[in-house]
Image (cartoon, rainbow, N blue to C red):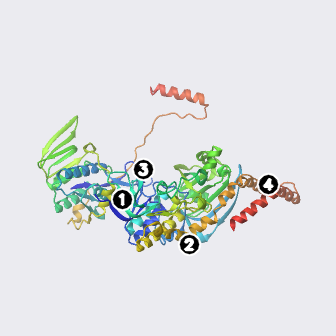
Amino acid sequence: MQDERVDVIVVGAGPAGTAAALTLARAGLEVVVIERGAYPGAKNVMGGILYRQPTEELVPEFWREAPLERAIIEQRYMLLTEDSLLGVTYRTQEFAKEPYNSFSVMRGEFDQWFASKAEEAGAFIITQMVVEDLIWEDGKIDGVRTGEEEGDLRADVVVLADGANSLLAQKAGLHREWKPNEQALVAKELIRLSEEEIERRFNVPSGQGVAMEIFGQSTKGLLGYGFIYTNKDTISIGTGALLSDLIETGRNVSDMLNDFKAHPCIAPMLEGGELVEYSAHLIPEGGWHAMPRLFTDGALVVGDAAGLLNPINREGSNFAMISGKLAAEAIIEAKAAGDFSAVGLSRYQELLEESFVLQDLYTIRNVTPFAHARPWLLNEVPEVLSRAMREYLTVDDDPKRVKQGKILRILRDGFPVGRTLGDAVGALRLLR
Amino acid sequence: MVLVKQVPDPNAVRFDPRAGDIQSGTPQVANEYDLHAMEAAIRIKEQQGDVEIVAVSLGQARETLNRCLAMGADRAIVVEDAALASGDSAVTAKALAAVLRAEGFDLILVGQETSDGGTGSVGPALAALLDVPVVSNVVALEQQDGRLTVQREIEDGRQVIDLAPPAILCALSGLNEPRYPSLKGIMAARRKPTEAKSAADLGLEADAVQSRVSWGALFVEEETAEGIILKDVDADSAVDQLVAFLQERKLV
């Protein structure tokens, strides 16, 4: 009995896999996507922000029809201490009008819609099926094994889009398991409130929303951040930290999230809301230093499976989509040349290097180690700045000159000269 | 001929009190009994060989028909027509009867009832319209030399019926265990035809497909359980009260 054969198999119908399938199908290749969830997006977790521009590279003007929650018009960055919140807010009407800048989304809904676009283009999506292994033929990956009877499917190229902790990238010999200090564990809850209530609490009109990143006590001072995003009639709230730090401090993310939700500066935003969903997910944050090899004979790895994401700028799904798209372009070229070996597929690496994906990963390659080596940045620094701000805002019988002296003293004690100079130099190096 | 229907997933249905209906966006799945009917058809084909299985559905059912094709149906027919979409079970039966008459059939297999409407009347109504015998509540089926031996579930036992096709059989879940489509079956399903038909294609007049039954309202019965709520008491006395409460009702 001959196994069925197609041009390309994509494993996983997240944004990376679907972007690859969509691009391949549009180019007329026969592509099959195998997804283990009941529907595309069923297994996917994301904080919730999708950027417009990279998404438009795959579906122009998607925002006219895709299931989106709210257009994000306001960004807040906050430092949270035990009892205070200090932050920067940026809001612009520029983000409130077409074509918008970013959106809060529900991955389950968005991924289904995105997958339907790939289907319209001619990709074939099979759900509720697990790929257990790769098939090798003459030293080249030549298909996948689903572990059931008559469950082998052959293809010229297999795109590994099986998400964080990609077992297939390991089986393909491209990768090892991520180490605990190369992944973050994030817990997230969805809290339901009415649309009107969300608009009132966050001071936004209908259809528009707010995104917040909160540093400091949101993670008990561990490297990471808490986030709050407004959806249509729910709020996404989550927090997380590097797995290695969680293990070391014996903290668990669900307690961390509960404390974050209960913080007096945060709780009023959620008050009276109903918990509708709890999820947790690993995020491969090893970045540039931990990146697997991205291609081999007959296979490419994309998205989270390749660790292609930027935690600093909250960018995961756009890296996924663009890497999927570039993988597809490399496959299309490989097909034209009739060469699906590693050499033929190496164009993928080139395309990634020319795009923002690998350039950005290179740019931020040392940010996590830098911040990790300076625990005071998320512990003492928010505390000091908050004390200085409180002093400044408190009216008492201190003459202003005395007050200025007090504020300067707080800052001087909080930012020891030697350490601060070291931080500044280090930060400048990062930006170079 | 196997008749199937796509229904809201019974495990995911939530009532939306604001809309007075089930929540929109509820995932759609194949009606469970229909899959047992489909499985029965495949087993007959496996035994007999020279059989064509046609899966027929009305309304939104592409995914369900694809599943039937992947399981082993040879082709599919879907009646997609806005005029029929909200029809009652009699309208459904008329539309399906028109398809079956046009296609011709030896045996019609259908689920005993659907999990959404649950009237269980489409099978019998088809039997009347097509003038063929019907056996409901089928839990076992054997065939030999062109005759069928059917067991149907009745109060306190089973009734064994011997008949010759053409006939309509309405399946219960005891009949078999529907197979899960194999990867090969799913891949093969892509090359099998699904034909779409409208009411006009079937020669159905507008007044022939007028519903006589319409939905009034959907509501969830209030369920109240008698209980006690312990608040602001220390743990020890709370436990004592809880245990007393359970003992009183002979629950522990």
Residue A206 visible at all: no
The residue that mark 2 highlights is A354
Q: Amino acid at mark 4?
A: Gly
Q: Residue at x 43, y 67 (%)?
A: A340
The residue that mark 3 highlights is B14
Name the one closer to the observer, A226 or A29: A29
The chain under label 3 reads: B
Q: Position of residue B118 (x, y in %)?
A: 29, 48
Q: CA distance from mark 3 to mark 1?
A: 38 Å
Q: CA distance from mark 2 to mark 4?
A: 42 Å
Name the one closer to the observer, A160 or B171: A160
Figure quadrant of the N terminus of chain B: bottom left
The chain under label 4 reads: A
B102 vs A91, left or right, is left
The residue that mark 4 highlights is A414
Of the numbered discs in the image, which one, if any, rests on residue A153?
A: 1
Q: Amino acid at mark 2?
A: Glu
Residue A26 visible at all: yes
